[in-house]
Structure formats: structure tokens, C-alpha cells
């Protein structure tokens, strides 16, 4: 199938590496035929890197609608700012293309619901490239938990703090503005975590959180912004099955960051990236978990995302990283943000069905007051 990329930033190269792994393993899925970026030079350089890694040079565009018109594509991968996801996806569906969306699914839950409805309206596939649940290691961890390796999950602890020295995460100032990113790091990074939580232990029922913007000004020496997205979020949540969780995301750390996930069950503990430790003291390393629980899954998460996209189109197979699961993960994030806004615990379902939206309203208000450079270029 013919594939196009909309957006040629940093994450796009990770997607190319995923396609490279598939090619190396002889797995036929997609040919990257065309790429688009509003910065022509970046698009050209990216096309050259694609040629080095995949052996073919894709056509280059700076206007995605022109790419959709001129190229005979089957699917696109959308790799752009969060506030553009829903609009660009609808154009792609209307052009008859299937879509893989880079996380988060959308800037906010209401737009996520719209995207899923649009995919249904045009009878197109919409999948989500969510690396936290894809690839051999992540699939093995989820399957190990589901099959009871560590017993019934009682609680999950997750810490993710980074030191930016008052600079920009990933070098991009827009990630700190909720009118373009949806929220601070709790949405940009945190949606990875919530998707992982729900994949390994089922739906989350209720969330309570405190959030704050501690860093009132950020700068890279050339660009200075006053963030509107939260740089710190401390959250507790309750799974539908009764398990509990404690989760923290922050880009406001100084001196030393921290990170790690602990999944505790009635028979042991599982540490993603490290090992499982059972109650008798036995340790099972990740390679053994992969051999036991995910022997036929490709290693690279982004490679797996294209297997999922291809199987969804060609075989009507439900993906692990579906749009609905992506919306659920986004709903957990916005339940935390809603809770911090109204000072009460929030049911995730009330976010998913649009019953509660005080925080989302502030995102939509900021979206209306700004027009991102990317959107200006695209429109």
C-alpha cells in the first residue's frame, strides 16, 4: 500500500525506523511514497533520509491537500501539532484515505469523538500510533499481567519528571501552550502512560489531581513563552476493577529528574524495561517475558503500528492501539485536568461523554484566540 507522511519533524524519523525494521524482516506493509511539511527544506532533507533508509525517495510537498490530490495514496500518517489533528484527519478521510494518528488522538476529547465519527462517516480506518502499548516488550508486559503472572493488580506507581532548565520540551515551545497541545506534559507525555495503564489493567473509573504551572516563563534564548499548559501534575486514580494508582508528570524539575513504573499485584511486581519479581524472589527478565508472551510481535513499536494499520485495512482486524482506546486514554488525562480545575474527583466516563468539560472549555477558548504557524501554513 502507498503511504504518505504529513509532518517531517523528529517523530517522523522514528516512524521511518519502524518501516525500516519491517523491510529488514521481510514484512510487506507500506511504501512511503510521499511526504509533506510546511518547511520545504526540512521535507527535502527528510526525503533524502528516507531514501537512505528505505531505498526509495518519496515525493515532496509543502501543502498536504495537494499531496492528497496528486498522489495515489492508500493511507497517511499524521505527525503534526495536536491542534491540527482533527482538521487534517477529516480532509484525509474525505479524500478516501485511511489514517494513522500520532498520539495523542486529538487536542481534546470532543475533537477525538469527532475524529472517530468522521472515520465512520467516510468508512475509513483510524488507528493510533501509541508506542507505550506496541512492540514486543509492551505487548509482553500487558499479556503477562492479563494472564496473571503477578496476580491481581492492586496498585500502579508511575513517576515521570524531567529537567528542562526552563527550556522547551523536545525543543518545541507549542508543547507548553494548551491551545496547541491541549495541556502541558500530562497530555504530551502523560497520554502514553494512561494508554498503558488501561491496556494492562482495564478502564479507569475515577481520577483526582492537583496541577500547577511552576515555571512562569520558558525560553531557548531566541523564543520566550509564558506557558498555559501545566508543568506539574500529581494524580491518583481508581481502576474499575478496584486497583489504585499514583501518577506524576512534571517538566518543572531542577537538578535531577526521576522516572519509572511499578506494577504491583498479589503475586509480585513488574517493572517495565527491567523485570518481574515474584513473591518467592524469582526475577524474570524482559527477554524471557517476550519469549513467553509476545514471541511473534515485532520489536519496534512504530513498526508494530504499521502492522496494525495494514491489518486494520486489509483484514479488518481490531488494533491494540485503536482510536477508541486512544480516546479513553485522553479521557483519563482530561479527567485529571478537570479534577484539578473543579477541585473534585472526576469520573472518566463523564469526560468521554462530554458531561464534564470545564477544563476542555479553557483549551477551546485558547484555540480560538490563536492560530498556530503550522495551521496558517496548512490553510
Image (cartoon, grey):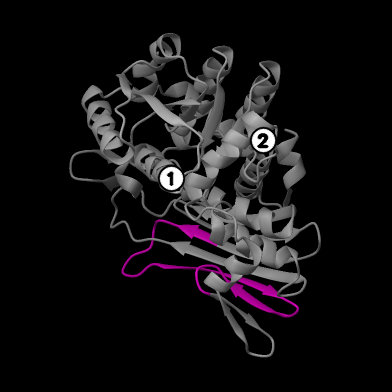
**Crowd rating for badge 1 (residues with CA inside 10 Å; few <14, some 14–19, many 20+):** many
Residue named by callout 1 = 18
Confirm whether the magenta stretch covers residue 249. yes
The boundaries of the magenta stretch are 248-274
Q: Is 190 left or right of 194, judged from the image as shown?
A: left
Residue at 33% over, 25% down: 58
Considering depth in this image, is 156 or 71 the residue closer to the camera? 71
**Crowd rating for badge 2 (residues with CA inside 10 Å; few <14, some 14–19, many 20+):** many
Q: In the displayed orientation, state which residue is furthest to the right.
A: 241
Q: How many marks?
A: 2
* Distance Cα–Cα, label 2 vs label 1: 36 Å
Mark 2 or 1, closer to the camera? 1
Image location (x, y in percent) of residue 56: 31, 30
Q: Is residue 62 visible?
A: yes
Q: Is 292 left or right of 186, judged from the image as shown?
A: right
The answer to whether 77 is drawn above or below residue 216 in the figure is above
**Mark 2: which secondary structure?**
loop
Residue at 33% over, 23% down: 373
Q: In the displayed orientation, state which residue is furthest to the front.
A: 26
Q: Which sits earlier in the primary sequence, circle 2 or circle 1?
A: 1
The answer to whether 43 is drawn above or below residue 65 in the figure is below
Q: Is 40 left or right of 308, judged from the image as shown?
A: left
Q: Is residue 104 visible?
A: no
Residue named by callout 2 = 357
**Mark 1: which secondary structure?**
helix
Considering depth in this image, is 271 or 298 the residue closer to the camera? 298
Image location (x, y in percent) of residue 126: 61, 30
Amino acid at each position: 500500500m502507498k503511504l504518505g507522511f504529513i509532518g517531517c519533524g523528529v517523530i517522523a524519523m522514528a516512524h521511518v525506523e519502524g518501516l525500516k525494521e519491517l523491510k529488514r524482516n521481510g514484512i510487506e506493509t507500506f511504501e512511503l511514497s510521499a511526504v509533506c511539511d510546511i518547511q520545504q527544506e526540512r521535507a527535502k532533507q527528510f526525503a533524502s533520509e528516507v531514501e537512505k533508509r528505505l531505498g526509495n525517495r518519496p515525493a515532496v510537498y509543502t501543502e498536504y491537500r495537494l499531496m492528497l490530490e496528486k498522489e495515489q495514496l492508500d493511507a497517511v500518517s499524521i505527525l503534526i501539532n495536536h491542534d491540527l489533528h482533527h482538521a487534517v484527519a477529516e480532509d484525509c478521510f474525505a479524500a478516501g484515505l485511511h489514517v494513522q494518528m500520532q498520539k495523542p488522538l486529538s487536542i481534546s476529547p470532543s475533537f477525538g469523538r469527532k475524529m472517530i465519527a468522521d472515520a465512520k462517516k467516510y468508512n475509513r480506518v483510524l488507528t493510533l500510533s501509541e508506542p507505550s502499548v506496541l512492540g514486543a516488550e509492551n505487548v509482553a508486559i500487558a499479556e503477562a499481567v492479563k494472564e496473571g503472572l503477578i496476580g491481581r493488580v492492586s496498585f500502579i506507581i508511575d513517576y515521570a519528571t524531567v529537567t528542562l532548565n526552563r527550556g522547551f520540551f523536545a525543543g518545541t515551545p507549542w508543547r507548553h501552550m494548551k491551545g496547541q497541545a491541549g495541556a502541558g506534559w500530562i497530555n504530551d507525555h502523560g497520554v502514553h502512560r494512561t494508554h498503558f495503564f488501561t491496556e494492562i489493567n482495564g478502564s479507569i473509573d475515577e481520577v483526582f489531581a492537583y496541577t500547577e504551572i511552576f515555571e512562569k516563563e520558558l525560553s531557548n534564548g531566541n523564543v520566550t513563552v509564558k506557558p498555559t499548559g501545566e508543568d506539574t501534575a500529581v494524580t491518583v486514580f481508581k481502576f474499575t476493577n478496584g486497583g489504585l494508582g499514583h501518577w506524576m508528570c512534571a517538566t518543572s524539575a531542577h537538578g535531577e529528574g526521576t522516572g519509572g513504573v511499578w506494577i504491583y499485584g498479589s503475586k509480585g511486581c513488574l517493572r517495565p524495561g527491567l523485570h518481574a519479581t515474584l513473591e518467592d524472589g524469582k526475577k524474570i527478565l524482559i527477554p524471557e517475558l517476550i519469549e513467553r508472551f509476545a514471541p511473534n510481535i515485532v520489536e519496534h513499536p512504530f513498526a508494530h503500528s504499521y502492522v496494525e494499520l495494514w491489518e486494520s485495512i486489509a483484514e479488518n482486524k481490531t488494533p491494540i492501539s485503536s482510536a477508541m482506546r486512544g480516546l479513553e486514554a485522553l479521557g483519563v488525562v482530561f479527567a485529571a485536568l478537570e479534577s484539578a480545575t473543579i477541585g473534585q474527583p472526576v469520573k472518566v466516563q463523564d469526560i468521554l461523554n462530554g458531561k464534564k468539560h470545564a477544563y476542555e472549555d479553557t483549551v477551546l477558548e485558547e484555540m480560538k484566540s490563536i492560530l498556530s504557524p503550522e495551521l496558517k501554513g496548512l490553510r
